[in-house]
Image (cartoon, rainbow, N blue to C red):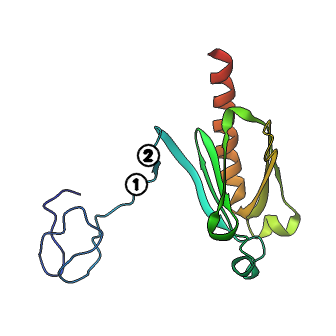
Amino acid sequence: MNAQDKCIECQEVVGTRRFCTNCGKENPKFKETSYDETENSKVIFTRTLYPYCLLSCIACSPVKIKVTTKRIDTASGCCFGNEDTLDLRRVKDIGFDRSCFQMCINRGTITICAADETHSELRVSCFGAKKVFNELRTIWNQTKLGTVVE
């Protein structure tokens, strides 16, 4: 994708924009990059979870979670007013649980225990949790080894 890319439909210059300003057609070469702007870290998992299904929006209880190779960011409450950041170096233990039914529908619960006064345990229940757990465990082990060596 470069600054001289043209729209497929009207042949106007689209550049690096997502949509053509002339006809509104989506730019097929546009790709959203997923990285943490503040640090040089890769985003492993980012999702908004609704623990009470449709009632989560009414009760202002959706939880937004972003897991990178350096930290875990959570936001919850009304308009995501409560934010918390957990450094992966402070994590003591990571666990994965799922029932037989959850295994059939590819769902699970990741439990993260940390040496943190505010939120010592974080539970993330979502679809595709096994893959996220494996990636998180690998990154956590690398972080532990890096901390011991330094």
Residue 64 in picture, x, y percent from top left: 64, 62
Nearest the viewer among 19 and 97 is 19
Q: Amino acid at mark 2?
A: Glu
**Which residue of the protein is positioned furthest toward the right in this rendering?**
99
Question: Label 2: how many residues lie within 10 Å, few (<14), some (14-19) or many (20+)?
Answer: few
Nearest the viewer among 81 and 47 is 81
Question: Label 1: how many residues lie within 10 Å, few (<14), some (14-19) or many (20+)?
Answer: few
**Mark 2 residue element:** loop
Could you tell me if the residues under marks 2 and 1 are in contact, i.e. CB atoms within 8 Å?
A: no
**Quadrant in which residue 50 is drawn:** bottom right
Residue 58 in picture, x, y percent from top left: 72, 81
Q: Which mark is residue 37?
A: 2
Q: Amino acid at mark 1?
A: Thr
Residue at 40 percent of width and 54 percent of height: 33
Residue 149 sits above or below residue 67 on the image: above
Which image quarter is the C terminus in? Answer: top right
**Which residue of the protein is positioned furthest toward the top in this rendering?**
149
Residue 138 in picture, x, y percent from top left: 66, 37
In three-dimensional space, the C-alpha distance between marks 2 and 1, rounded to whole angstroms, equals 10 Å
Q: Which mark is residue 33?
A: 1
Horizontal relation, residue 111 to residue 75: left or right: right
**Mark 1 residue element:** loop
Horizontal relation, residue 59 to residue 23: left or right: right
Horizontal relation, residue 6 to residue 136: left or right: left
